Image (cartoon, rainbow, N blue to C red):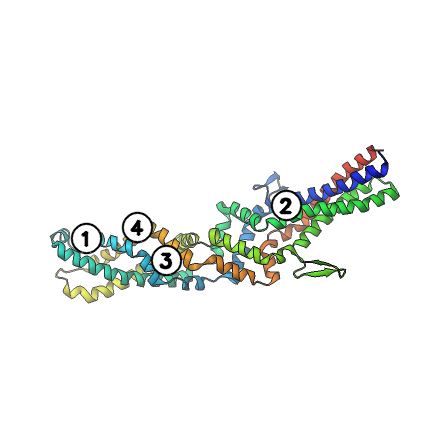
Amino acid sequence: MPQWLFLLLTVPTITGAIGWLTNWAAVKMIFGPERFIGVGKVGWQGILYHHADKFATNLGNLARDHLLSSDELVEKVDADELDKVLAGVLDAEAPKLVAEAAEKVRPGSWAMVPPPMQAMVVEQVKARTKVISRDVLAEVQGKATELLDLQQVVHGALTGPNVRRLARLTQEIGGKEFFFIEWSGGVFGFLVGLGQLGVWSLMHTWWLMPIVGALVGLGTNYLAIQMIFRPFEKTRYLGVFPYQGLFPKRQPEIASDYGRTTGAEVITAHNIINLLTSGERGAELRAAVEEAVSKRIDAEWQQVKGMVPLPVSDEQLAEVKQLVVTKMIEMAPQVRPQIEEYLDKQLDIRNTVETRLGSLSKPEFERLLRGVFQEDELTLIVVGGFLGAGVGVLQAALVLGGF
């Protein structure tokens, strides 16, 4: 085979392979391995997993500061509409609640009340229960505004046992950009290989191969990352070639994807309720419910106690209040699916996030994806250089062995 043909077939092909391999490795290093592999401090863990806390915190801050606010979300909830969602369950529980409350005041008394009178009392309780529930919901709304931290909702949905969700959603949203990193390395590497042919033809120096391989690894990784994010706006290079960074160019599409995944998996009614009902927040919310129930029952009791033939002590009234609160807590799992369905529809996270993310400035929008691995970009580029140099050594051996 003629020397020039051998070089033409091998050099650009191998440099293209170097470029693709190093960029492919860079992408893989973002998402894996999930756990640290190495000895001591020497080793590697996928950037997303290693910096999951930081990335989730940044995304939470972005959501809270630029996309949504706790006040806005809570204000979207209509207490009257939510009361309609709960009405069926509350009405179904009313007879049992009345019977148990009567037993708290005087054991056996409810069984002595004629059925028509029982039915009338139950209907009255149903009507007053609706008033109490609306007041309690209004109180919960006020407390939720204080307790709801969207940054914590996002953080909890993407870290700890949910860290794989962070990796999966990042791959889904930025899939086209990561694919560009991979194949662009091959294209850049092939072009560099053509230039390398000229250098080899003039100098015939084998050690230029690993040097060029290192430069290809460094350069292709660097260029691919830069071309994803910059320039923010379409720019003509040399007055002829138009180009805009892939990420800013795809802002509307990415905003749509991010809105969809955020509304479906991150800022959901399920996750919001989990945050508000667990730990210290849950204790504070329960205290707010107990206070609201207590105030409302006290107000109701003042209106009807003159018509009640039986004496009711403060202790008995306190037991009734506790009974109501206990019943509400027992009912929570039963009504939660309906509440979540209503809240997901009412909050409309998907469309809100999509609209506002689409209107972010390009620099703020860039933070959405680049922020997770920006501090590790240099590491990815350097690793690309080492891989490129290693393949360059193999390339030199191949070229020298061909003569």
x and y, in percent, of residue 397 in the image: 80, 35
Residue name at image x 67 percent, y 52 percent: 225
Q: Is residue 13 left or right of residue 182?
A: right
Whole-number angstrom distance, CA of label 2 to CA of label 4: 49 Å
Residue that carries the numbered disc 4 in the rendered image: 330
Residue name at image x 24 percent, y 66 percent: 299
Residue that carries the numbered disc 3 in the rendered image: 285
Q: Is residue 138 above or below residue 382?
A: below
Whole-number angstrom distance, CA of label 2 to CA of label 1: 65 Å
Residue that carries the numbered disc 2 in the rendered image: 27
Going by the numbered disc 4, the residue's amino acid type is: Glu
Q: In the rendered structure, are the residues bearing label 1 and label 3 in contact, judged by CB atoms less than 8 Å apart?
A: no
Note whether residue 376 is visible: yes
Whole-number angstrom distance, CA of label 3 to CA of label 2: 44 Å
Secondary structure under badge 1? helix
Q: In the rendered structure, are the residues bearing label 4 and label 1 in contact, judged by CB atoms less than 8 Å apart?
A: no
User: Looking at the image, is mark 3 or mark 2 nearer the viewer?
Assistant: 2
Q: Nearer the viewer, residue 51 or 165?
A: 165
Whole-number angstrom distance, CA of label 4 to CA of label 1: 17 Å
Q: Is residue 113 above or below residue 142?
A: above
Q: Nearer the viewer, residue 318 or 370?
A: 370
Residue that carries the numbered disc 1 in the rendered image: 99
Whole-number angstrom distance, CA of label 4 to CA of label 3: 15 Å
Quarter of the image that includes the C terminus: top right
Q: Earlier in the sequence, mark 3 or mark 2?
A: 2
Residue name at image x 50 percent, y 54 percent: 260
Secondary structure under badge 4? helix
| Quarter residue 303 falls in | bottom left
Q: Nearer the viewer, residue 356 or 139?
A: 356
